[in-house]
Image: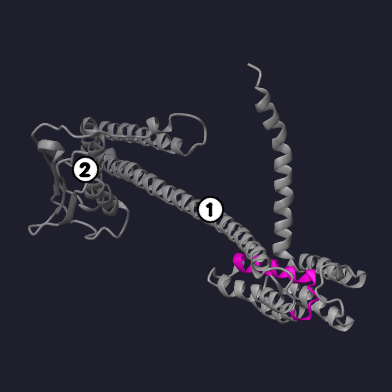
Amino acid sequence: MDPMPEEQETRAAEPLTQWVQRIAHAVRAFDRRHPLPWDLTFTGFWVTAALIDYVGGGWENVARNKDVPASLLLTMSLGLSLPLLWRRTHPRAVLCAIAPMAIANAWSGAVLQAALLQLVIVYHIALRRPLRSLWWTTILVITPEFVTAARHSKKSWDEQVVPLLLSIALCAAIGITVRTRRDYTEALEDRARRLETERDQQARLAAAAERARIAREMHDIIGHNLSVITGLADGGRYAAARSPDRAAQALDAIAGTSRQALTELRRLLDVLREEDRPAADLTPQPALTDLDQLIDGVRKAGLPVSTTVHGTPAITPGRELTVYRVIQEALTNTLKHAGPGATSQIEMSYGDGGAVTVTVTDTGRGGDTDGTGGRGLPGMRDRTALYSGTLEAGPLPEGGWRVRLHLPEETPQ
């Protein structure tokens, strides 16, 4: 379907509008960086206009008194126009400097048109100063009109004062409008900057959380499997001299465990790739059904493990992963620190609403009490905190070590 004529006109007008906006933006940007050239140009224009009015005698067309000395006319022309150079930085001081010249202009009856330049100052006061300044500004600007009406009256005072009051109101309204627009634009720009900063902070936090998650998963995968491999290698070394068959079985178990670790590690590292693929689906997510395989591997490494289960597991996949990783880390620590001849026992109790309690005990020597020696216990506590659970880890009075995990019932959303 062909575009409507109105749409074609809009599309044709857009480049010109954008061009004008770019030019205006460039001019404003230059003015902010270098205000003096524009101030000199603006002031020079009005000084020239005031001098032309004085030299050319144009002021006589509206003068109430044509016998004003030339020196006074020159002084008033410069005094009413030259201070505009500082109108943006010191508008109130400029208005106070012009006021005596405006009163002298009204008293002498010259009625120079340069006196109307006070309206430019009114605009800048409305643009840059508190709005309450407009009260005394209006009084200061309107006073010469009362002087003219009292000393050189040709019209009623209201015919002279009311038009000037309307002009003052118009200039003030323009200044307030520009000021409101400027403040609104600055607020939008500030909000955009803050949103950009918050977005960058969110990205950094997300990246840090992802790095912590990957580091935790790599610790769980590599730490556990290396502990199993170490136990199998130690057992195979002792069995090599007496039972070559047992040594061969240990080597086969080491090879199987290594392949499993490499497979899980590759799947985890796939998450870091930038290619379009369902990376989340490839992330290793062990469940309770994988516990038997985990425990069999630990047993092959030489650690006797017994399990007791109370209730029927009915928990979410996230909780299953937490239970699996806590048991994995507890068994890994037992392999590392318990010493020869240690045994381990796992007791799992499932309640209503997804509640679960897991206790892993061993008869070994124990290890790092507060878990500051590595990522193991802090990682387990981080996982547990995700589900408002509690994790206790420490030595038993009669010897050995215990890790106890409790996840409360799930809160309905």
Task: Provide the secondary structure element on which disc 2 rests.
Answer: helix
Q: Tags 1 and 2 in contact by the CB under 8 Å rule?
A: no
Nearest to N terminus: mark 1 or mark 2: 1
**Three-letter amino acid code at disc 1?**
Leu
The circle on residue 327 is 2
Question: Of residues 175 and 205, which is closer to you in this image?
Answer: 175
Q: Position of residue 93 (x, y in %)?
A: 66, 79
Crowd around label 2: few <14 · some 14–19 · many ≥20 (10 Å): many
Q: Position of residue 187 (x, y in %)?
A: 52, 56
Which quadrant of the structure image shows residue 252? top left
Tell whether position 109 is magenta. yes
Tell whether position 59 is magenta. no
Q: Residue at x 54, y 70 (%)?
A: 130
Image: 138 above or below 250 = below
Q: Magenta residues? A: 107-127
Residue 320 visible here = yes
Q: Which residue is mark 1?
A: 188
Crowd around label 1: few <14 · some 14–19 · many ≥20 (10 Å): few
